Amino acid sequence: MSFDALAELRSAGNPVDQLSQAQQQVLSSLSPEEVATLNAVKARMDAAGSDVAGHALEDDVIGIGIF
Amino acid sequence: MHIADLLARRPVPAAGVFLTLTRRCPLSCAHCSTNSMRDSEEHSAEIFSEFAATFSPEDHPEAVWLTGGEPLLRPDLVEQITRASHTAGAKVVLITGLYFARRDGNVAPRLLRAMLAVDHVIVSQDIFHEREVPRAAAFATVRTLVAAGQDVSFQVVGRDADDPYLAEITAQIRQDFRDGVPALVAPLGAAGRATAWLPRRQPARPHRDEQPVPAPCTMAAWPVLTFDGTVVACCRQRVVDGPAPDHLRLGRAPRQSWPEVARAVRERPILRALRVIGPQSLAHAGGVLPAAAGYCGTCETLSDSTGPTEAATELVGRPTFPVMESQVRQMQLAAGPEAFARRYGISRYAHMLTLGHHAPVEVG
């Protein structure tokens, strides 16, 4: 069975159906590795959006303010 | 301009720039991340004013963040940069510790003029600042600014989510300013003077055989013009203090103009790769073991060998990379400024960032 990049992205919660046909066409050409990267980023952002302390995902980013 | 609208643009390359006008500060806060003192380094004003003079209506940052040290030790420079920024179409943000308000909260006319010239004032508020500038004096100054129509926010730091100081100060900010003044609440970090007494958190380190999970870096998007004119691509204090690793070093102002710096931030392959997969995945792709020092520590090692730079060039050169880049940025923009506050601040207090924010945050 061939790899369906859009379906993989959709199942991870990426709002691919809101994109234009042209954008969906480009996304459908992503490799499994690239789709995995986007889905991992999505999962990470979802985790940081929960009550879990997002800061724990990285080490200290302290500098001129945290901006 | 509201702090939520300013931070909503944090993932966008070159949407903002930091200018560290001086390392000097009259306060002696025990946690100061820049290790600022009354006689710290301060370089020629022309470094900063000439760099700001390269902003134009056609090519300028959306927001210029003036920081230090204490930038209000150079109020004329603040006003000069603000004029240049406004002429080009950029907003200006000022970060201050309110050293001048120590006695009674009164503000000298010259300093008030500078604070009202900018578009947003961020006031540092924490248990260490309170030993230098009493809370009543700081709040009186904020009231003066709010009454004059200025947008103000607090930058509050505390030990962690359970620090009772944070519960108490955020409650008072909400009560005294009737939920009209927002705050970014962040954890204390082991940088500057705090390294002497604050234990450094042990960062997570992937196992040597484990492929790191991609983790985009939001910080590699806004350049910093540091105290001596060096321009770097990250606001982490160790990078700002230098020497910055080659991949994060963008040049030297005013020799490098804003358009040159902005182009480097947007186009340098390793920065683009960092913004999509982060330093640990990039190190792995380049055949380098992620450093024991964790996420940022790994980034600091990326220029030690050619592998990560070559891997970044290969990644960015793929025809599909632009769409990956666009997708990651859209995810970050859609998550909004509260996501930034949760990730880099203390999650429990992320809601403080949008106090007083009535307009929808632009995510486009």
Image (cartoon, rainbow, N blue to C red):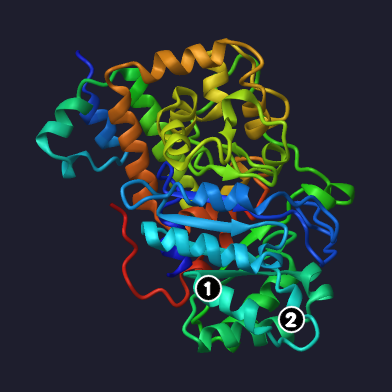
Task: Evaluate whether residue B274 shows in this view.
Answer: yes
B176 versus B244 height, above or below: below
Q: Which one is in front, B192 or B164?
A: B192
Dot 1: few (<14), some (14–19), or many (≥20) neighbours within 10 Å? many
Tag of residue B354: none
- Residue corresponding to mark 1: B182
- Residue corresponding to mark 2: B101
Residue A29 vs residue B105: left or right? left
Q: Residue at x 59, y 87 (%)?
A: B143
Earlier along the polypeptide chain: callout 2 or callout 1?
2
Q: Mark 2, chain letter?
A: B
Q: Residue at x 33, y 29 (%)?
A: B324
Q: Quadrant of the N terminus of chain B?
A: bottom left
Q: Amino acid at mark 1?
A: Pro
Q: Residue at x 84, y 74 (%)?
A: B131
Q: Position of residue B282 (x, y in %)?
A: 52, 21
Q: Amino acid at mark 2?
A: Ala
Task: Evaluate whether residue B349 shows in this view.
Answer: no
Q: Which one is in front, B152 or B347?
A: B152
Residue B141 vs residue B99: left or right? left
Q: Position of residue B246 (x, y in %)?
A: 62, 24
Query: Mark 2 or mark 1, which is nearer to you?
Result: 2
B336 versus A9 height, above or below: below
Helix, strand or loop at mark 1: loop
Q: Residue at x 39, y 61 (%)?
A: B87
Helix, strand or loop at mark 2: helix
Dot 2: few (<14), some (14–19), or many (≥20) neighbours within 10 Å? many
Q: Position of residue B303 (x, y in %)?
A: 62, 19
Q: Which one is in front, B247 or B66?
A: B66
B363 versus B297 height, above or below: below
Q: Position of residue B165 (x, y in %)?
A: 74, 72
Image quadrant in which you'd find residue B107: bottom right
